[in-house]
């Protein structure tokens, strides 16, 4: 239970993308009542070992997503 989180708050549905150029999975989401938009990475989501969150303070709104170009740039 998360005390103080309103029904419209909390973490919104994540988006997970794989970047074959660096072998990492990227999970991006929004924590409405917390840090805002952020992402984490892992080389194997089944291991459950993710990076520390990387905040994206300049990315507004909810439901962010990554798109990787053919050269692997986001």
Image (cartoon, helix red, strand yellow):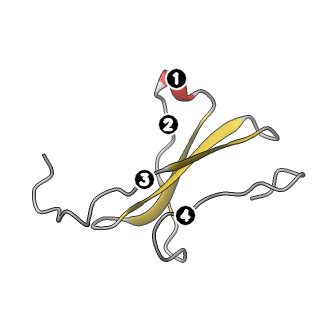
In the rendered structure, which disc, 3 or 2, sits on the residue that comes first in sequence? 3
Image marks 4 and 3: residues in contact by CB distance under 8 Å: no
Q: Residue 13 carries which label?
A: 3
Image side of residue 43 versus residue 69, left or right: left
Q: In the rendered view, would you say 29 is above or below 18?
A: below
Q: Residue 20 carries which label?
A: none
Image marks 3 and 2: residues in contact by CB distance under 8 Å: no
Image side of residue 3 versus residue 60, left or right: left
Residue 25 vs residue 51, the one in the foreground: 25
Q: Quadrant of the C terminus?
A: bottom right
Query: Seen from this angle, which residue lies furthest top?
Result: 47
Q: Nearer the viewer, mark 3 or mark 2?
A: 3
Few, some or many C-alpha atoms within 10 Å of disc 3 (few <14, some 14-19, many ≥20)?
Answer: few
Could you tell me which secondary element the residue under label 3 belongs to? loop
Could you tell me which secondary element the residue under label 2 belongs to? loop
Few, some or many C-alpha atoms within 10 Å of disc 4 (few <14, some 14-19, many ≥20)?
Answer: some
Could you tell me which secondary element the residue under label 4 belongs to? loop
In the rendered structure, which disc, 1 or 4, sits on the residue that comes first in sequence? 1
Q: Nearer the viewer, mark 4 or mark 2?
A: 4
Residue under the image location 47 percent in, 46 percent down: 52
Q: Nearer the viewer, mark 3 or mark 1?
A: 3
Image marks 3 and 1: residues in contact by CB distance under 8 Å: no
Between the C-alphas of marks 4 and 3, the distance is: 9 Å
In the rendered structure, which disc, 3 or 1, sits on the residue that comes first in sequence? 3
User: What residue sits right under mark 1 in the picture?
Assistant: 46
- Please provide percent x and percent y for residue 57: 49, 73
Q: In the rendered view, would you say 22 is above or below 71?
A: above
User: What residue sits right under mark 4 in the picture?
Assistant: 64
Q: Residue 50 carries which label?
A: 2
């Amino acid at each position: 239970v998360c005390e103080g989180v309103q029904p419209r708050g909390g973490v919104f549905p994540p988006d997970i993308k794989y970047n074959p150029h660096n072998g990492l999975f990227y999970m991006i989401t929004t924590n409405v009542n917390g840090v805002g938009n952020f992402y984490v990475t892992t080389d194997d989501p089944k291991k459950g070992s993710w990076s520390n969150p990387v905040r994206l303070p300049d990315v507004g709104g909810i439901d962010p997503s990554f798109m990787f170009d053919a050269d692997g740039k986001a």
